[in-house]
Image: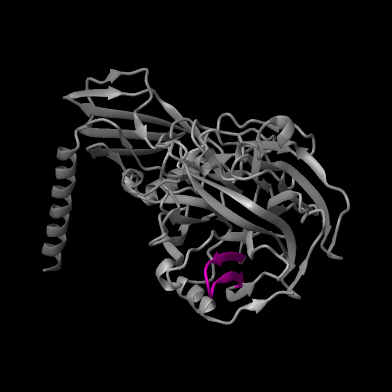
Amino acid sequence: MTSRLHIHALTTLTITLLMLMACTPTPSDVKESDLLPPMYPDYTDITIPHNIAPLNFLLRQDAEAVEVRATCEDEELRLCTKGNKVCFGMSEWKSLMGKAKGKRVKVTVTILENQQWTAYKTFFWEVSEEAIDPYLTYRLIEPDYEIYQNLSLRERCVENFDERPIADYGLVGNRCMNCHTYGGQSPQLSMLYVRGEGGGAILNQGGTLSKLNIKTKDMVSGSVYFGFSPSGRYIVFSTNIIVPAFHARPNKRLEVFDSASDVYVADLEYHTILDSKLLSDSTVFETFPTFSPDGYIYYCASPKVKLPMQLKDMRYSLCRVAFDEKTGQFGSIVDTLFSGTKEHQSVCHPRISPDGKWIVYTVADYGTFPIWHQEADLQMKNLQTGKTDSMSIVNSNKSDTYHSWSSNSRWLVFASKRDDGLYGKPYFCHIDHQGKVHKPFVLPQRDPMFYDENLKSFNAPELGSGRLPFEAIDVKHAVDGQAIDFK
């Protein structure tokens, strides 16, 4: 009986393999093309981390069948499939990436269309030995920001396709939620904001969540934009009165500006607020603060103008001031690294690499809300030499902004609207030890049709070195709890 079952199983497997072979023809009489394949997403000639999820893609044409050969030395991943979708098996992909670490993969795509096989121009994947942080958090939200129904903060493992909510609109009383930010890319220290009455800053310390009311009566609002200090004891944050304004022009849609803003530091150990007149000047708008590894607070500052009439004259400079974590004291001098007035551009969202060598920021024509500014681009400055890189290989003719670093300073993730000008998607780019910036690629998805069908923007993506130690229900319990006040 056992023998019969064994024979039956082998027969079934043989028939299945024969059916698959019959359904997916082998290329023959192939015509060569000097064009790259019309693939989406564009994964041609890019540098990728060896631990990235499979780069599944589709072809923007009516392909009857596709053959893909991805070869590195004596390792080859060959995939034949019907239709125009290419989805790699996880185990086969991981095997190829393990072999290709620090090497180059040659990729050839051959398609069958109208009974003719065509081999497109070969392209390459440079597989970096330097891993990317395995987790990514982001906010999924309607791109216009006017509504936030079904808003959620999500965590995705970039090594595979696992995703989960870490905070959910329906669990926090239908409140708006701001983005999640790590301290030093560590899952053991992070924070997010739940807005509205009864909300607060939800601080994660090793999986223990607490709700903070980071506000005093002298501040114009509660904390809005923030960043952790290197030790994790402090956060630097801005208080902003934010005013939305809607454009009649479809390429702008929404403008947001501050009618007041200042920068402070909060001591998370003693629940006190530290201030400096340099960062809360009544004649200046200060915002987007962040700590550097070497003891500076970087932020953006603009002279006050009459709003909204002079909005296009509002140009933020990139500034910094020293801060001593041991004493909690601010420095007495403000350095200006990029003058918005002289450059006729406005800076926002500065982020310093964990190794302290580079700072990346967004530049736009004016203002502080680059999401709907098509001219918004990323720039990178070498903090040791002062040299600026326009990052031309990274930027597009649509908004590119909201960026963060990996913990090894070799990868950058940012939100780009390059595909359709409407929906932001997370793109990664490699930055090598010499500061050379490589062509970016979008976060891979299990189904390569995902981005065509998705109706949410990926907002403020952040890389993390591990899985967060809490669930969405834990955020609900923290929101329902008593807030810790600051003084």
| Between 470 and 277, the one nearer to me in the picture | 277
Q: Which residue is rendered at x = 33% and y = 30% of the image?
A: 109
Predominant SS of the magenta segment: strand
**Magenta-colored stretch includes residue 240:** no
Q: Toward the viewer: 487 or 350?
A: 487
Identity of the residue drawn at 13% across and 48% down: 15
**370 over 224 or under it: above or below:** above
Question: Is 201 a magenta residue?
Answer: yes
Q: Position of residue 437 (x, y in %)?
A: 61, 34
Classify residue 55 by image quadrant: top left
Q: Is residue 475 above or below residue 56?
A: below
Quadrant of res 263: bottom right
Residue 315 at x, y percent in the picture: 67, 39
Residue 118 in the image: state x and y as whole percent.
27, 23
The answer to whether 25 is drawn above or below residue 299 in the figure is above
Q: Position of residue 20 (x, y in %)?
A: 18, 43
Quadrant location of the C terminus in the rendered image: bottom right
Residue found at the far bottom of this picture:
482
Q: Is residue 230 visible?
A: no
136 horizontally vs 225: left or right:
left
Residue most toward the right?
A: 332
User: Which quarter of the figure is the N terminus placed in?
Assistant: bottom left
Q: Is residue 376 visible?
A: yes
24 or 167, nearer to the observer: 167
Q: Tell me the magenta residue range.
A: 190-206
Colour setup of the view = one colour
Looking at the rendered structure, the number of numbered marks drawn on it comes to 0
